[in-house]
Amino acid sequence: MFDIKSLLQRGIEKELTNVDDYIFMPENIEVEIEGGQLNCVLNSDGRVDIFYSKDGVTDVRSAPRKHPLTAFEYELHHGVYDDVIDALIKEVDKTLDSRSKYFSSKIVPMGAAITAEPFVINR
């Protein structure tokens, strides 16, 4: 049998803790991890953006805020977003370990912001 009171209470609690109703103070936490730079950003709308850069390759993932009434640094410390971070690191490492079948023996110029020297891939 359904408990109407608990069902209504859960519905009201969900409405009260809706992340869309809150404006968060933006936060940015950076750490060096597994040879790369991890940047975790809490946006004012409650979205969490996680950037990971390693050896010139950057990838980003977004996640909804999982515990809106908990400090962002506390969430990170307790591994709330570790699954997102693990997937991000794996994807960057996969990109770094891959080789192009088209550009393996060609000179590929790098962007001017990184270096003015061409990047040569030797196999």
Image (cartoon, rainbow, N blue to C red):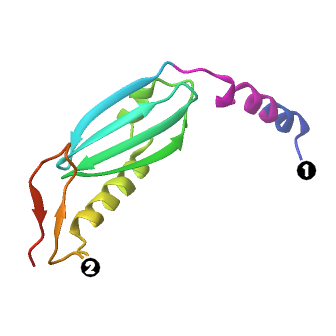
Viewer-side residue, 45 vs 64: 45
When asked about the image quadrant of residue 38, the answer is: top left
When asked about the image quadrant of residue 74, the answer is: top left
Q: Is residue 9 magenta?
A: no
Q: Residue 7, image x and y in percent?
A: 84, 39
Q: How many marks?
A: 2
Q: Decide: marks 2, 1 in contact (CB < 8 A)?
A: no
Which numbered tag is attached to residue 102?
2
Amino acid tagged 2: Tyr
Mark 1 or mark 2, which is nearer the start of the sequence? Answer: 1
Please tell me which residue is depicted at 81% across the width and 35% down the height of the picture: 11
Q: Residue 64, image x and y in percent?
A: 56, 40
Q: Residue 44, image x and y in percent?
A: 54, 24
* Image quarter (top left, top right, bottom left or bottom right) of the C terminus: bottom left
The answer to whether 51 appears left or right of 34 in the picture is right
Q: Residue 14, image x and y in percent?
A: 74, 33
Which numbered tag is attached to residue 29?
none
When asked about the image quadrant of residue 23, the answer is: top right
Q: Main secondary structure of the magenta part?
A: helix
**What secondary structure is found at the residue carrying circle 2?**
loop
Q: Is residue 21 magenta?
A: yes
Please tell me which residue is depicted at 17% across the width and 49% down the height of the picture: 35
Q: Which residue is mark 1?
A: 1
Is 5 located above or below residue 60 in the figure? above
Is 30 located above or below residue 27 in the figure? below
Q: Residues within 10 Å of mark 1 (few under 14, many from 20)?
A: few
Give the extent of the magenta segment. Answer: 10-24
**What secondary structure is found at the residue carrying circle 1?**
loop
